[in-house]
Amino acid sequence: MSLPFVRILLDRVVGALVVLCVMVAAIPVLVLFLFVIIKGLPGILTPGFFTQSPHPQGVPGGGVLNAIIGTLEIVGIGSLLAVPVGVLIGIFLSEYGRNQVGDTVRFISDVLTGLPSIAFGIFGYSVVVLTTHHFSALSASIALAVLMLPVILRATETALLLVPNALREAGLALGAPRWRVTLEIVVPAALGGIVTGALLAMARAAGETAPLLFTAFGNDIVQTNPLQPMGALALTVFRNALVPYPNLQDQAWAAALLLVILVAATNILARVYVRRIQR
Amino acid sequence: MMSGARFVAAASSVLLLAACGGNTGVTNPSTGGPGVPTPPAASLTGAGATFPAPFYDAARFAYNQKFSQVTINYQSIGSGAGIQQLIKKTVDFGASDVPMNASELASAGGSDKVVQIASTLGTESMAYNLAGVSNGQLRLTPKTIAGIFLGTIKNWNDPALAADNSGVSLPNQSITVVHRSDGSGTTYIFTDYLSTVSADWKTKVGKGKSVSWPVGQGAKGNEAVATTIKQTPGAIGYVELAYVLQTNMTQASLQNHDGNFVIPSPEGATAAASQFLAVNPSQFSIVDAPGKNSAPISGYSWLMLYTDQPDKTKGTALVDFLDWLVTDGQQYAANVHYARLPSNIVRDDINSLKTVTSGGSTLLSVPAPS
Amino acid sequence: MVPTPLVAASHQRPLVSGDRVFSVIAYGAAALIMLIAVIFIIALFIPALPAITKFGLGFFTSRTWDPVRNQFGALTAIYGTLVTSAIALLIAFPIGLGAALFLAEDARLSLVRGPLSFLIELLAGIPSVVIGLWAFFILTPLMRDKVDPFLQHTVGFLALFKGTPTGYGFLTAGLVLAIMVLPIMIALSRDVIRAVPRELREASLALGATNAETIWSVILPYARVGITGAVLLSLGRALGETIAVTMVIGNTMQISASLFASGYTLPSVIANEFTEATGNVYLGSLFYLGVVLVLITIVVNVLARLLIWRFSGSARASA
């Protein structure tokens, strides 16, 4: 069967365009990675980057220890708040949520997912900072927890729904109460998906800047007290990028590379974990 | 809480540097010398002006070395923000290049509830990014500065600019004006200056921490204005001197009140300040000062704290630090291109700090050397 | 929709106390997220009241943003938000759709498809501040020295491309947003296209249509609703993006026809001015902007999800 030339030509053109599109989409990613690695690597390799706090403006050297500790602690506390609640809501949705209450929860969760990240910052400021009269890591953790919640609960629900009903029925047939079936059979069977969801949520939270601006606020000193203002890697990138001092700008690139590594590692960890569970 | 004990000494310029590396290690002497009170352990948070930020940054670093039990977190978020956060009581002290005005004081509970002290003296530069025009080569008059920021002078080869710059080859290039996007004391001092020297500016725009800019693009903080100018050929903006000198930007010679062209310097700020002896939180403008060496766009920067400190320990640490900042701490000003406070201002500051109390008792223990 | 689990039948079983406690805990968790939603609304709305009562709906039509005279309007920021998002979609829609067609459909270069998908997923995970950093230092000089002058040279007669390019402004911000929404656009469209029933595709090819014709007359019409949903979700993301845009938009309260001009968007105004707003009206106006932003994104997102639901419903029905 031979097609008219024009139709073949058109087909080829569309085929080429589609390839072009995917290349155009991939180029920015490659360029971005390239620059972050090239510009960030020297800073990361600078002695003191991991062990020192920032030096005063205009004084060379210094590190981002304050921000590394801050990011870990803020995201850590946020996860402690969000993961248990998110998993519980996910269990509710899959095991009890085939009703209007469940639909409402799903709707709220979807709305929260779509909200701009700056809105969570306003939330944290309005609810925590203004009532406690202090910028604090905790207010940032709470803002991030609300941001993480929908990711975790949806991942949990999806994972739980994938557990075959035969498992539930087998458990119930053996006379186990429903809560034990859920906690001891269904949840463990879905653990891979739940952990993945939690890890992805943590990766997203670690990279967020806007929710931290009016909550964690930033701190150039190593601070571990969650009731005090605290630095964070994302804040370091944002603030140092705009500062005219070369050593601080280098730190911005290095902190950016560190963030990207952190986020990528968490993502890969999540994938690997899923594979291991699935085996 | 971080006690910052292990120090990795890093000698750089005159500043003695230290990096906090954990809670272990060598113990540090935490008692002050004669005349310097030994503060209690506390963690203080301040926020505000970016104009004096390099000075505060250097000073708080040095103070933490002297007294490792006190850590001070200063975030340079702009003067407007500093005042606002003090009113909201989210910080222990606020910083602004413009003292709080009546309505701001009212929001904070009244003028007797807040103590405002001058902390340092600085000056602003007109920094620019023009290939082939080196530092100090560009000469600007009050009229041309106002023209550029009003948008009536749009190109670097404008005749008005050429008239003051014979011998300088100004390119045929559009001027990109960079100004602050946040509420800023640097902006206040600059627009105060423009309102003083240009009737046009006074009626069309006026002075304030934020104004409706006729032209240009905004950047947040002195830092970002400096960075944006460095990034953008043809750009000009007003930046605190420290940022200009520390990052090797090019700045213009400015014509002062007496008609002399001066390159802004700490000495120029001191000369300007010497023309205005009675400075206080309601009478603080020193722009367009007479005198042949005066830098025209100079100003004090201020710190604010509540007269009645809720937490006695924290309050004591705070006044002790501020007392040190306006006395011994002034030595760190010169390193980062600020001028020392005049002695009459220091005296006023200490008298103000003596009025700070907690539970009715005065917090500033040791009378500082005059 | 997922089939109702059979265990739902166990409702008939008399609840032992453990089950009751557990269901109370589960319902409690569900109630918690509703409580959070309510607090969220209150936390956003109450502080906005001083501005809402002072400016009312006039807020939306006023171009003034004058902290000195305490007069505020949202029009400039809304304009900037819409313009940058529109640029983002104009760029991301065709490229994203093309890339999605390749990733979902194309049999060629199957070796690179996996890595390409992975790469684009990685882009979705890159923090926006990192993209902002890259855009600020790498993209703005490139725009100023190469792209903008080229546009001015070729289509400079349009009002869109007049003025002096500084590298900052609507066009650069729009481009950054395009890069940021591409992964969403691609991933969602790819899933939508994959959901087109195989039989339809094969029938078209069997009838002698070329790949291009199949795409044009079978796949795209079928996936239209779902793709619209993907575009809307991308829009939702673009409207609310804060940090990366703040770093390149130029932060100036102005409405300008030129895409080279600096501007402002709703989230960047909030990010820049939130901590410094003096007085209830100024702060209230920023909260008011927040309310506007949240409402717009909710409407766009809900619409998008409805469309995608409708699509996946119809896809399943005909599968």
Image (cartoon, coloured by chain):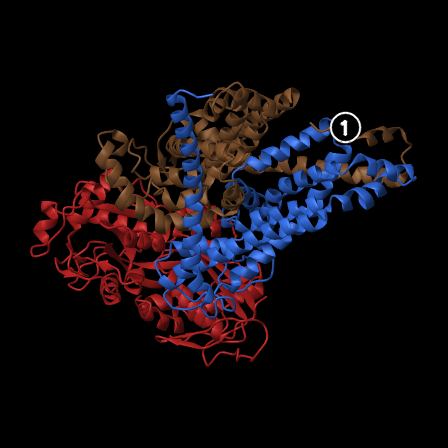
Residue depicted at x 34% and y 37%:
C171
Q: Is residue C100 above or below residue B51?
A: above
Q: Colour of chain C?
A: brown
Question: As rendered, which of B46 and C255 lies closer to the eye?
Answer: C255
Report x, y in % for residue A274: 67, 48
> Which quarter of the rendering shows the N terminus of chain B?
bottom right
Instruction: Judge whether residue A134 can be spotted in this image.
Output: no
Disc 1 chain ID: C
| Chain with red colouring | B
- Using the image as rendered, state which of residue C134 and residue B305 is in the foreground: C134
Q: Quadrant of residue A159?
A: top right
| Element marked by disc 1 | loop
Disc 1 marks a residue whose amino acid type is Thr
Q: Nearer the viewer, residue A176 or B224?
A: A176
The residue wearing badge 1 is C4
Q: Is residue C222 left or right of residue B156?
A: right
Disc 1: CA contacts within 10 A as few (<14), some (14-19) or many (>=20): some
Residue C317 screen position, x and y as percent:
66, 20
Query: Horizontal and vertical percent for residue B243?
Result: 31, 60
Q: Position of residue A214 (x, y in %)?
A: 50, 48
- The chain painted blue is A
- Nearest the viewer among C184 and A109 is C184
- Residue B273, compared with residue A30, is above or below; it is below
Residue B280 found in image quarter: bottom left
